[in-house]
Image (cartoon, rainbow, N blue to C red):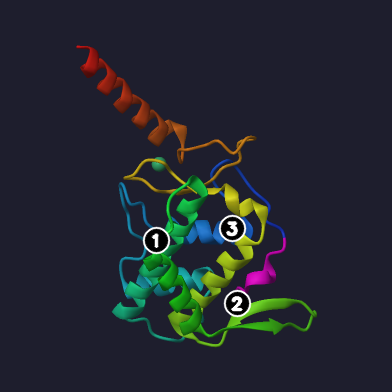
Amino acid sequence: MLFSGYAYNHLEMADRDTATGVLGLIQAFVNSVDLQDGPEELSHPDALKAWLVAHELMEAGPSVSEADLRHAIAVREAIRGVIGANTGGRVYPLDVATLNEAASASRLRARFGADGKARLEPEATGVAGAMGRVVAGVFTAMADEAWARLKLCSSPTCRWAFYDSSRNHSSRWCTMATCGNRQKARRFRERTRATA
Ligand SMILES: [Zn+2]
């Protein structure tokens, strides 16, 4: 069965950096590229299709074009933008427009399933439908307070999406082992240079 927004009722969290359920899906989509060191998982239309089929966002039948790939990457980066708002980043009108267009293009509708529960489902198929499922996932995730814990790494070259499981929601780096220490080392070098 294809993923639908309300299929994941419990936003249970795993370790410090990785969310599960619908939040985990959104995180995985945003982190399908490592902006700092690579790789880009969505490097080719076939790679996009494989990713979407593996995550049950799309049927295996429809073909995927270069335009579909550009669309999916635009949606991914727009989601990264709105996650940035959880860490005090500004929300850009282009990101908002991209997400609204993705919702419209997928023709998201409220549907009541046989279980009597409502969900958002796209009428469109292919990549447009898959992006509708992703946007429906963001919609569902935003309705849960756990959404505020999905953050972007404060390193401007990293911007990795991580789940902040710290008690006071104060984490700023994807992992202290890499980005946090890198920032600390940079500040230390700047201070040493300033005093030299
Ligand atoms: Zn980072």
Asked if residue 6 is positioned above or below residue 113 in the image, the reply reads: above
Report the image quarter containing ligand 1.
top left
**Left/right of residue 97 with respect to residue 133 in the rendered view:** left
> Of the numbered discs in the image, which one, if any, rests on residue 23?
3
- Tag 1 residue: 92
The magenta segment = 3-9
Note whether ligand 1 is within 8 Å of mark 2: no
- Tag 2 residue: 2
Which amino acid, by three-letter code, is at mark 2?
Answer: Leu
**Left/right of residue 77 with respect to residue 148 in the rendered view:** left
Where is residue 54 drawn, in percent x and y? 50, 69
The residue at the far right in this view is 116
Callout 1 touching callout 3 (CB < 8 Å): no
The answer to which of 135 and 16 lies nearer the viewer is 135
**Residue 19 visible at all:** no
Note whether ligand 1 is within 8 Å of mark 3: no
Which amino acid, by three-letter code, is at mark 3?
Answer: Leu
Which amino acid, by three-letter code, is at mark 1?
Answer: Tyr
Crowd rating for badge 2 (residues with CA inside 10 Å; few <14, some 14–19, many 20+): some
Residue drawn at x 44%, y 79% is 127
